Amino acid sequence: MSEWTKGFWAMIAVCVTWGLSPIFYRALAGVPTAEVLAHRTLWSLLLFLVVLGIQGRLGDLRAALTGRHWRRIGLAALTVSTNWGLFIWAVQSGHVVQSSLGYYIFPLAAVLAGVLLFGESLTRMQGLAVALAALAVALLTWGLGVAPWISLGLAGSFVLYGIAKKALPLGPVLSVAAEVALLAPLALAWLVPQALGLMPAPLAQPLAFGADLSVSLLLIASGAVTAVPLILFSYAARRVGMATLGLMFYLNPTLQFLCAVLLFGETFTGWHMAAFAMIWAALAIYSAAALWQSRRGLPLANG
C-alpha cells in the first residue's frame, strides 16, 4: 500500500469519526455539557501524554508550554474549547442540522477571514462561492425568522482557532496536546468542586462520572474520540495533498447531516433545503477553484 493510500484511508477514518460523533455525544445527552467538555479535555490530555511519551517528545510539550508561543496556544485552547462545547451542546439539544451547516460554512468563512485579516486574494470563482454561502445564510435567517447562530458560532470559533494556530510552529498533535494541557486546570476547577460539593448553588450539579458505569466509560472514551482523529489527521496531512484533504473534509458535515435527518429525526424545512443546496453549490464552486489552483501550483486563497 502506497503512502498516499495510507494517508487517504487515515483521512477517511478521521472524517467518519467526526461525522458520526453526534451519535456518541447524543448517548451523553443526560450529562451536563460542561462535564462532558471537562472529561473530553482531561482524558484526551492523558492519551496525548502517552503518545508523546512513547515518541520521546514530552520535552517538546514542556518547551511549547513554557516558550514564547504560550499565549497563542492559550488563545487556540480557548477557541477550540468554545467550538467543542458548542458542538456538544448542539448535539445534546437536538441541533445537529445546524452543526452540520456550521462545518459546511467553515471553509468558506476561513476564505473570507483570509481576505479580511491577511490581505489574501480571491479568484472570481472563490468570490462567487463565498457570496453564495452568505446568501444562503441570509435566506435561512429570513425564512426561519432567526439567524442560524449555532452554525455561525461553530464556523466562527473554528475560523478563530485556525487564525490562532496560523503562526504556531508546532505540529497538530503537539499543538493540540499543549492546548488541552492549558485547558486541564479549568476542567479540574469545574470537576473537583462539583465532586466535593463546594460549587456555589447556581452552578452545582451532580456529577455523572462514577454514578453510572456505562456513562463513565463513555466519558473516558471521549478522550480517544478527541485525540485519535487528530493523530490520524496529522498522519494523513503528511501524505495527502491539502486540496484532497479539503475535499474529504466535507464527508464530516455530510455524515452529521445524515445523522440529524435519518437517525435523530430533526426538522428539515424547505428553507433548510434551499440553504443547504446553495451551500453545497458554493462548496462545489470553491472546490473546483481550489483543485484548479492546486493543479497549476498556485497558492490557495485560504492558506
Image (tube, helix red, strand yellow):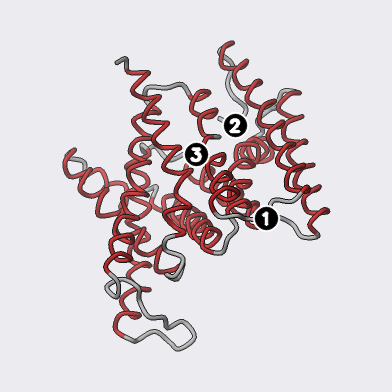
Question: How crowded is the residue under tag 1: few (<14 C-alpha within 10 Å), some, or many (20+)?
Answer: few
* Residues at marks 2 and 1 touching, judged by CB atoms closer than 8 Å: no
* Residue at x 20% of width, y 48% of height: 50
Label 2 or label 1, whichever lies nearer to me, is 1
Q: Please state which amino acid type lies under the numbered disc 3.
A: Lys
Label 1 or label 3, whichever lies nearer to me, is 1
Tell me where residue 293 appears, x and y as whole percent. 61, 17
Task: Identify residue for label 2.
Answer: 302
CA separation in Å, label 1 and label 3: 37 Å
Task: Identify residue for label 1.
Answer: 267
Q: Please state which amino acid type lies under the numbered disc 1.
A: Thr
Q: Please state which amino acid type lies under the numbered disc 2.
A: Asn
From the viewer's perspective, tell me whether residue 132 is left or right of residue 192: right
* Residue at x 36% of width, y 49% of height: 225
The mark found on residue 258 in the picture is: none
Q: Secondary structure at mark 2?
A: loop
Q: Earlier in the sequence, mark 2 or mark 1?
A: 1
Q: Nearer the viewer, residue 94 or 240?
A: 94
Tell me where residue 60 appears, x and y as whole percent. 25, 43
Q: Earlier in the sequence, mark 1 or mark 3?
A: 3
* Residues at marks 2 and 3 touching, judged by CB atoms closer than 8 Å: no
From the viewer's perspective, tell me whether residue 222 is left or right of residue 251: left
Q: Quadrant of the C terminus?
A: top right
Task: Identify residue for label 3.
Answer: 166
CA separation in Å, label 2 and label 3: 11 Å
Label 2 or label 3, whichever lies nearer to me, is 2
